[in-house]
Amino acid sequence: MKYIVSSEEETIQIAQNLAQQVSCGMVIALYGTLGAGKTAFCRGFIQSLTHQSTEVPSPTFTLLQIYDTPLYPVYHFDMYRLKTPDEAYEIGIEDAFAEGVCLIEWPEKLGYLLPKKHISITIDILPDKKRQITIE
């Protein structure tokens, strides 16, 4: 599916809709350049399962933020700073795959650790500052 959005609010709406369709054990890989809207997408997803007031910062420096929801934990990873895929073991990626839903920014850094079965979301910045969100 492809969507063209012109605001962060529209991105968040798509994320909220997706959040209502996933189940425990799902992995969502978010691709896009810096500033494309990956964290905004994750914020909408997480807030739809918790509370609109839940603070959802980018986990760029912590690498991982965990959010409890009534259904399952949501693991929000930012792999941008990983040097090798094996570093993901140190932050508990195996447990996250088994216990909750994983939102992974910069999934290409995981290499062979990214499960073959996952939802791929690519956010492209268009020339008019709109975004194209592709969900596969």
Image (cartoon, rainbow, N blue to C red):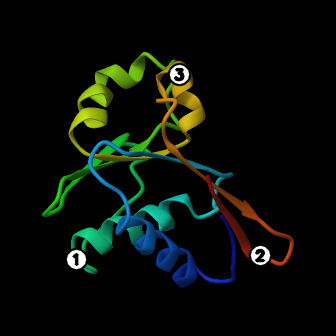
Q: Nearer the viewer, residue 1 or 46?
A: 1
Residue denoted by label 1: 51
Label 1 neighbour load within 10 Å: few <14, some 14-19, many 20+? few
Residue denoted by label 2: 129
Please give the name of the residue rendered at 48% of the width and 36% of the height, measured from the top-left corner.
Answer: 117
Task: Indicate left or right for 2 with 61 as reference.
Answer: right
Q: From mark 3 to mark 2, how far is it between C-alphas? A: 31 Å
Q: From mark 1 to mark 2, how far is it between C-alphas? A: 29 Å
- Residue 18 location, x and y as percent? 44, 66
Residue denoted by label 3: 83
Q: Nearer the viewer, mark 1 or mark 2?
A: 1
- Precedes in sequence: disc 3 or disc 1: 1
Please give the name of the residue rendered at 13% of the width and 63% of the height, measured from the top-left corner.
Answer: 70
Please give the name of the residue rendered at 46% of the width and 69% of the height, measured from the top-left corner.
Answer: 15
Label 2: which secondary element: loop
Label 2 neighbour load within 10 Å: few <14, some 14-19, many 20+? few
Q: From mark 3 to mark 1, how far is it between C-alphas? A: 34 Å
